[in-house]
Image: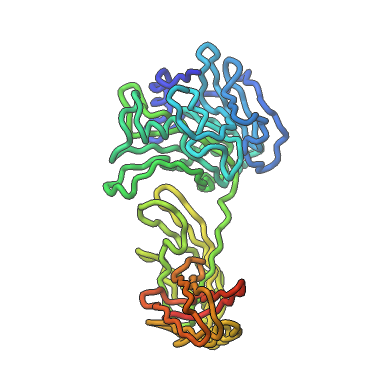
Amino acid sequence: MKNLFEKTRKFSLLLILSGSLACLPLSVSATTLASADTTVNGIADFEDLGLAPETDWHGTQNGDTVIRSGSYSFTNTYTPDWDSWMGFAFANISDSTYVPDLGYGNQYKNAVGGGALGSSAYGVVYDHGVVDLLEAGEEGAEIPGCYVTNNIMFYNAAVNGDTYSGGPFESGDYFKVFFRGIRPDGDTAVIEYYLADCRDADSAEHYILNSWEWVDLSGLGAVSQLLIGFEGSRVNQYGPLLPSYMAIDKIGVVRPESRVIEDSLLIGDDALLAFEDVFSLPGTGRWDVVAGEPDAEGVASVSVGEEGLQVSALGVGTCRVELQATRNGRSEYVALNLSVLDETGVEEAAVASKALVAAMYPVPASEYLNVRLSAPVSGLQVVNLQGRTVYEERSASFRAGSVVSIPVSGWSSGIYLLCVEQDGIQQVLKFVVR
C-alpha cells in the first residue's frame, strides 16, 4: 500500500497557507458508502460503517466517495492506479505500534489504538478533510466537539524521526490541526489545536499527543460544513515535510462528564487545594486552570492561584464549582463539591462511634492528632477528601488504652478521615486540621 505522501506535499501547501484552508470540490458523480439512517445531531462514531476488527477502508473506486456516519458525511478521494487516497479513511485497528516493515500500512493506526472512549472504529484524516452536516438546514448547526489523537505515522516521525521529515522533534517544532467552519452565509471561523508542541523555551511544556482528547468546536457557531487541515514546523520549497495525518472520532459529542470530588472546610477557614490533588492529568508542564462560579452564593469562594485553588469558607452549606484544567495538551473536567461546616457538626461526627477509638484530641489539630484506642487495632490510615492517603501505619503495639500521635503539621487545612481497622471491623472518623 502506498499513499501519495511525497506527491501531494506541494498541493497541501496550497490548501493550507497562513491558517487558511481550501478544499477539493465534491464530484457531481460522487458515490456513497454506508448510507445509514441519520438522526438530528447524530454523533459520527464510525461504528455504523461495519468495519471488521483490524481492518481499514480507504477507498475502492476512482474519484470521490461520500461516507456517512451519524448526521455527518465525509469525502474520500481515491486513485486506484496508485492505491492512494486523500480526505478521510476509516479503521478498526487496536494496535498502536509503528512497524517499519509495514511502510504505508501504518497510516491507518493511531497512537492510542482503537477509537475514543474505548470504542473500536475511528476516522483517519490525511492532507485535508471535508465534512458536511447532513441536517444543518438553512440555519446551520453547532458541532459541540470531537475527539482527536495523533496518527502513528506522524507520531513516529515526531518521536523517532524519519528519512523524509528529519530527526525527532526538538525545541521550536510543532504540528497542529485547523478546524474551519463554513457558515450558511459564507462566513468562516477557525479553531486550532496543537497535536504536538515543542515551541516553549521550557522543555517541561513540550508534548507529542498520544491520548484521545476532546476538542471544543462550539466556538465555530452554526455551520453547514467543516474543513480540516494541518500545519507543521517542518517544510521545504515543495510543502510540508511532516506526515499530515490525524485520527478523529465521535464528531458531534459534548464535552466529557465532569469527575466529581468532595472537600470540606470549617466556616471562616481558607485553604489551598493543590492542582495535583484535584486533577489527574499527567505531564510536567504548567497548569492552565479555569474555575466557574459556585452554584450557591455565600457558601465559598474559589479562585485560581499559581499552585492551586484558593478556597475561602464563607458560610455553612454546600456548593458546586466546575473546573477545567489543561496541561501538556490534555484537558480534564472536574466538579468540586464543597461543604462548609461549623465545629459543632464536626465534633459530633467525630465521637459518633467509639468501637475502636476512645478519643481524638486536640480537635482541630495543628501539630499532632492524638488517638486513644479503646481496643487493639492492626492499623491506622488517614485520607483526605479526595481519597488520597496522607498517613498510614501498622503495628502490633496498637493495644487498648494506647495513644497514637499522628503528625499533621504541614498538612493542608481541612477535614480528613481517620480509618482504624481490626479483624475486618473498620471505623471511620472525621477530624479537622488547621
> Residue 275, percent across and down?
42, 62
> Residue 280, percent across and down?
47, 57
223 or 155, which is in the foreground?
155
Query: In this figure, what is the number of numbered marks?
Result: 0
348 or 275, which is in the foreground?
348
User: Eyeballing the image, is 9 above or below 262?
Assistant: above
404 or 209, which is in the foreground?
404
Q: Residue furthest front?
A: 396
Q: Residue furthest left?
A: 201
Q: Residue at 44% of width from left, 84% of height from top?
A: 370
User: Eyeballing the image, is 249 above or below 165?
Assistant: below
Mark yes or no: residue 314 visible. Answer: no
User: Eyeballing the image, is 54 above or below 317?
Assistant: above
> Residue 184, percent across and down?
57, 38
> Residue 169, percent across and down?
32, 36
Q: Residue at 53% of width from left, 85% of height from top?
A: 400
User: Eyeballing the image, is 280 above or below 253?
Assistant: below
Q: Residue at 56% of width from left, 63% of height from top?
A: 260
Q: Residue at 41% of width from left, 18% of height from top?
A: 7
Quadrant of image for the C terminus: bottom left
